[in-house]
Amino acid sequence: MHISSLNWKQVESYLEKDDRCVLPIGSTEQHAYLSLSTDSILAERISIEAAEPLEIPVFPVVHYGITPLFMDYPGTVSLQPSTLNLLMKDIIDSIAHHGFRHILLVNGHGGNIPLMDFIAKQYSSSAISIKFHNWWKAEKTWKKVMEIDPVASHASWMENFPWTRLAGVSMPGAQKKMCDLDYLKKLNAKEAREYLGDGNYGGCYQRKDEELFQLWQTAVLETRALLETGW
């Protein structure tokens, strides 16, 4: 259940019986023909669907992340690592102040990974238990991606769900050749745009919705399992 559907009294009542919550983290950045909010949309929706049967509250997604490589694509917003670190610490400290002790961070953006690992470690010796979950890279979810089509990456079919598509925007029909990720890491923002073109790293732009729904269900169940066990 999304925290926006609750008032403070309901949260207080919830905390009398449970101390779990979910905090999704995304990004606002280019995703070729998909929404600039793709990472945020996916992280928040997976969080809500995973937590709903357990009646665990989900806080609003953090819409901004670390994405300097895409800054030559209009609409992209990139935070400094120090900014995101302080923002996440303030949010987590606020959540913990009210009594939440088991917090699942559901991340939808690769550029956030190093800092999110660092943030989780900051609380490793505290009374707060934090799990960090990259939903698309999780074992069962990534296995399903490989089963459907191993040529998949940023802004390709694996992020193209009905809820990340834009009305009136058509997808290219051809499969794009996968970029050289090691080479890409050496580029600045201007060079990255010249190299990537539309922003897709490689792969088909869209596959059948039946396949996407299989992938989605796998991701939701894998995320839910983290909420249920292993704290």
Image: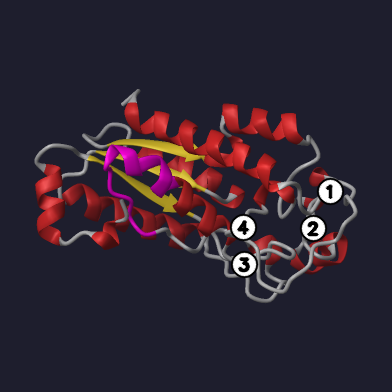
Q: Which residue is mark 3?
A: 36
Q: Which residue is mark 1?
A: 183
Q: Nearer the viewer, residue 83 or 15?
A: 15
Q: Which residue is mark 2?
A: 187
Q: Are marks 2 and 1 in contact (CB under 8 Å)?
A: yes
Q: Nearer the viewer, residue 24 or 96?
A: 24
Crowd class of label 1 (few under 14; some 14 to 19; many from 20; radius 10 Å)? few
Quarter assignment of residue 10 = bottom left
The label number, if any, that marks residue 162 in the structure image: 4
Rendering coords of residue 87 (x, y %): 37, 60
Rendering coords of residue 43 (x, y %): 49, 51
Q: CA distance from mark 2 to mark 1?
A: 7 Å
Please say if 216 is above or below 2: above
Q: Residue furthest top?
A: 230
Residue 42 falls within the magenta-colored stretch: no
Residue at horizontal 27 percent and vertical 57 percent from the top: 3
Q: Nearer the viewer, residue 142 or 72?
A: 142
Q: CA distance from mark 4 to mark 2?
A: 32 Å
Q: Nearer the viewer, mark 4 or mark 2?
A: 4
Q: Is residue 186 left or right of residue 21?
A: right
Q: Secondary structure at mark 1?
A: helix
Residue at horizontal 84 percent and vertical 48 percent from the top: 183
Q: CA distance from mark 1 to mark 3?
A: 24 Å
Q: Are marks 2 and 3 in contact (CB under 8 Å)?
A: no
Q: Nearer the viewer, mark 3 or mark 4?
A: 4
Q: CA distance from mark 2 to mark 3?
A: 21 Å
Residue 55 falls within the magenta-colored stretch: yes
Residue bounds of the magenta highlight: 47-60
Which of pointers 3 and 4 lies earlier in the amino acid sequence? 3
Please say if 140 is above or below 98: above
Crowd class of label 4 (few under 14; some 14 to 19; many from 20; radius 10 Å)? few
